[in-house]
Image (tube, grey):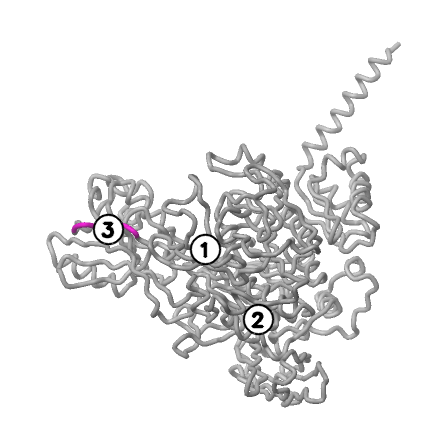
Amino acid sequence: MKTYASILLIAFFIHCIHECVANTNSTIEHYIVYMGQHSLSDSKTVISSNHEMLASVVGSVDRARKATIHNYHKSFRGFSARLTQEQADEIAKSDSVVSVFKSRQYELQTTRSWDFMGATDHNSVFGNYSVDENYEVIVGHIDSGVWPESPSFNPNDMGPVPSRFKGKCVTGEQFSTSNCNRKLIGARYYHGGYEQAHGRLDSNSKGRSFFQSARDDLGHGTHTASTAVGRFVTDSNALGAGKTVRGGAPKARLAVYKVCWFDKCDGSDVLKAFDDAISDQVDVITFSVGQPHGPRNYNYLTDELSIAAFHAFLRGILTVASAGNDGEKGPYTVSNSSPWTLTVAASSTDREFVSTVQLGDGNTLLQGFGHNKYQMNDFRYVIKGGDAARPGIRRRDATFCKRNALDTGIINGNVVVCFMESPDDNMLEKSSVVRDGGGVGMIVVDLHNNYDKGKGEYYPIPTSVINQDEADKLGNYVASFRDPAVKIWPTVETYNSEAPKMASFSSRGPDATTPEIIKPDITAPGVSILASWLAYSGAPPDATSFFFCSGTSMAAPHVSGVAAIIKAFNLGWSPAEIKSALITTAFSVDNTGNPIESNTKSATPFDMGSGHLNPNAALDPGLVYDMNADDILYFLCSRDTPISALQLLFGTVNCPNPQTGAYDLNLPSIGINNLVGGISVTRKVTYRGNNDGPKVFNVQIENPQGIEIKVQPSVLDFSSGQKTLTFRVDVNSRQALDDFVFGSLTWYNDKYSVRSPIAVRSVNN
């Protein structure tokens, strides 16, 4: 007769077998369960309901709690948890679930810019705007944290923290409540999702410094936050370049949400940060993070940023996000491209950092670029990397100055000429290779016309990046002299270049998911932007409190800062109206009056959106295109979104019959894909000008090639006091080109110019 203990042992053994089989056959991964809006009474009830749902597939509430990474319970409903594919599929069958998907990994998408755009005066609205004394705008910043001691976050002369702010100053490693102040009013951090994907933070540091708190350990967050809302800081030069640093909205409050660790940002952590930021009642969210490596094609309801920005939009909060840095990979690479997000590309300013190379013939100077603080006291022999290959190494690898390809005995004490193998080459890495081999200087030959490449780098030895024309001069000199020598001079800051130009790295449209939605929306300065940085021993070489960076990461906070000021002046404006004001006032020509360039050609809306950020004009746009929850509902209806999912998002749902097209979403741009013959598009505009300003607008059309556009009515008259008017745009194909062509529609009078880009792809039947 078996004893009770024996029976228990056998039962336990059988249980273990079942568990082992289950774990062998089903890999546990990190999933996000998105459930839309919720009407439950409080957060505790939401969390309890989440655990009960999860318990139905994992076996018990206790196991559900252990499997859960995040609960989303403030601004929308959902959770993230460790699940098998089978468990995730089972949960997805529930009527209360919108979508279930694996948590993705995101990457960070890494002053003179405000002067260049005309927002210069310390006493102007951009430095000292006056708003309702009971309301001060709050910018939510979701990134890699902040360096709170930076002078950009000085709280002097700022009033008490707005009482409506519901956020917290969460303490952690080297971050206490005293690090928050009247400028930096909130700080939170999230790493549960990151650790699920990459392991514990302390075991993943690989010797790099990090802070398990909202304190920034990368620099990216501090840089972008100070670009958006930093105070005026004078004498802030980095490597002798740059005099004044400031953000777009110097008197806006800052709430920080750290989601990025070692250049990686987990999607479930991002969702949790948005859940908190929305509940904390921020006014604008700035987000310089995106999925790497386009092209991108996603479902709006299975993408973390799209979901988060959607709920922010419904709560009256505009999300401004970077377009991505995959431009060299071509079209269809834009990220963060949902229509309720403001997506920002990157372009240059008129400031350049010239690093001159003097040839030993005594007469010739080559103009190159790069941040270079070092002084070469004499001329040094110059040698091509390909002529200094180590034994057994391909000459090609040495030409590109790859790691372990150069003979240190040959390059020691000399200046090395390195070529770029591809537009993605890391010039800083090349410079380090030359330095480590004993080289005293480097000249990089860029044959890819990436004038913006390497401008923002801090090189460890004297370095200059030159183009094809300058390389030809250098080649002729080297071929003509037995002992060619050069001297590289320290960087000189200049302000006379043709600008803006689109950055080669800035990701391009159209959006792979919905080409009718023109993306990016706008471009802003993103090349060699000077802003606050870190000030500790683990910071990048030669950086103290300020640093130059390039990327769409740097462009997005320029727009966020201006959006914050628009909000401060116009408390009743919706996110769509603020977005419209920014888009329709952008300029499409450079400082010489010529079209903005992209890779030596005129930029299109898929490069720059409507054009370059124009801060002063955006404050008073005249007309705006608004959009509300019903507009988004109809748009999602047109995307064949299941009714059950729409009900979880909007409640009672009535999709129009027949469906409207994506082109009818009331955006300040018009995109039409696969046009056959003709089509009519409807738009509504709202008058937001001064009461005594001009109220009659005429229309001006720039027809895309092979397309004829007519607008009815051709005059909009708001003189009677009516605030919103509707017009129809008839688009007819005269020539099928099977590719996108571009034009514009502008409503104008003697004060306002309200311009919308147009993109049309006409095809044969």
Quick check: 575 above or below 196? below
> Can residue 345 be seen from the camera position used here?
yes
The residue that disc 2 covers is: 582
Where is residue 460 shown, x and y percent of the image? 32, 46
Label 2 Cα crowd, 10 Å radius (few <14 / some 14-19 / many 20+): many
Residue 480, quarter of the rendered image:
bottom left
Which marked residue is nearer to the observer: mark 2 or mark 1?
A: 1
Q: Earlier in the sequence, mark 1 or mark 3?
A: 3
Label 3 Cα crowd, 10 Å radius (few <14 / some 14-19 / many 20+): few
Q: Rounded to the nearest whole Å, what is the CA distance between mark 1 and mark 3?
A: 25 Å
First to last magenta residue range: 373-378
Q: Earlier in the sequence, mark 3 or mark 2?
A: 3
Q: Earlier in the sequence, mark 2 or mark 1?
A: 1
Residue occupying image coordinates x 82% and y 13%: 6
Where is residue 635 shown, x and y percent of the image? 71, 68
Instruction: Tell me, yes or no, whether the highlighted magenta stretch contains residue 687.
Output: no
Mark 2 residue type: Leu
Q: Tell me which secondary structure the magenta stretch mostly adopts.
A: loop
Label 1 Cα crowd, 10 Å radius (few <14 / some 14-19 / many 20+): many
- Check whether the beta carbons of the residues at disc 3 and disc 2 lie within 8 A of each other: no
SS for dot 1: strand
Q: In this view, does 251 lie to the left or right of 242?
A: right
Residue occupying image coordinates x 74% and y 46%: 89
Where is residue 434 shown, x and y percent of the image? 28, 45
- Check whether the beta carbons of the residues at disc 2 and disc 1 lie within 8 A of each other: no
Q: Rounded to the nearest whole Å, what is the CA distance between mark 3 and mark 2?
A: 44 Å
The residue that disc 3 covers is: 375
The residue that disc 1 covers is: 531
Residue 62, quarter of the rendered image:
top right
